[in-house]
Amino acid sequence: MKLQTLIASTALLFGLASTTQAHHSAVQYDFAKQVKYTGMVTSFSAKNPHLLIELQITDAKGPHKVEFEGHSLNNMYRDGYRKDMVKIGDTITVNCAPLKTGVEGGYVTSVVTAKNEFFGMASRAAPSAADAAKIQAAAEGKKE
């Protein structure tokens, strides 16, 4: 009986451990702030469980890569994302909730693509006036 209890407990612990490794919280991001990055896409993965983007940014620090994480593909699709909107080599603008640690990167709240298309969480994106116009036009079914 003790052996069966030990086996069951061990199996439960391994099951819980794999679940906690499979997904993590967004607590490391500061959703009260928004930061904008523009750069060339070096990596883009739009599949579950998260959007992953890596941009090559050139600024006062010189050229360097910055990584971003975003919502699930299902949520991104609801927020306007469509397949092939972003390609490796495109220059895009990413609005994000920055990492609380101060490291560059963050949680994607919206993206303006190379073709000037918009997708993202409009309510959290703190979009520029131009982005806000795109959101409004999209809501009204207009093309700019």
Image (cartoon, rainbow, N blue to C red):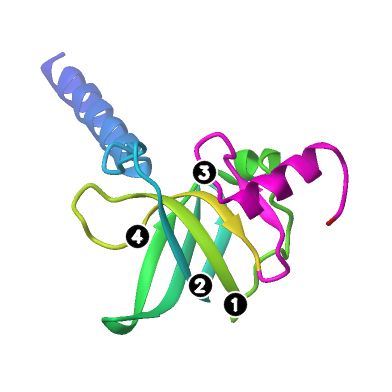
Q: CA distance from mark 4 to mark 2?
A: 14 Å
Q: Which residue is mark 2?
A: 43
Disc 3 designates what residue?
Answer: 125
Assess whether mark 1 and mark 2 are in contact (beta carbons under 8 angstroms).
yes
Q: Which mark is drawn over residue 88?
A: 1
- Looking at marks 3 and 2 on the same chain, the residue that comes earlier in the sequence is marked by 2
- Tell me which amino acid carries mark 3: Ala
Q: Which callout, 3 or 2, points to the residue nearer the camera?
A: 3
Quadrant of the rendered image containing residue 20 = top left
Q: Please identify, in this view, whether the residue under mark 4 or under mark 2 is nearer the observer.
A: 4
Q: Residue at x 72, y 50 (%)?
A: 134
Point out the tag, 4 or 2, that comes first from the N-terminus. Answer: 2
Q: Nearer the viewer, mark 1 or mark 3?
A: 3
Q: Does the residue at mark 3 contact the one at mark 2 (Cβ under 8 Å)?
A: no
* Vertical relation: 115 (above or below) 82: below
Q: Amino acid at mark 4?
A: Gly
Q: Is residue 99 left or right of residue 82?
A: left
- Residue contact at pointers 4 and 2, CB within 8 angstroms: no
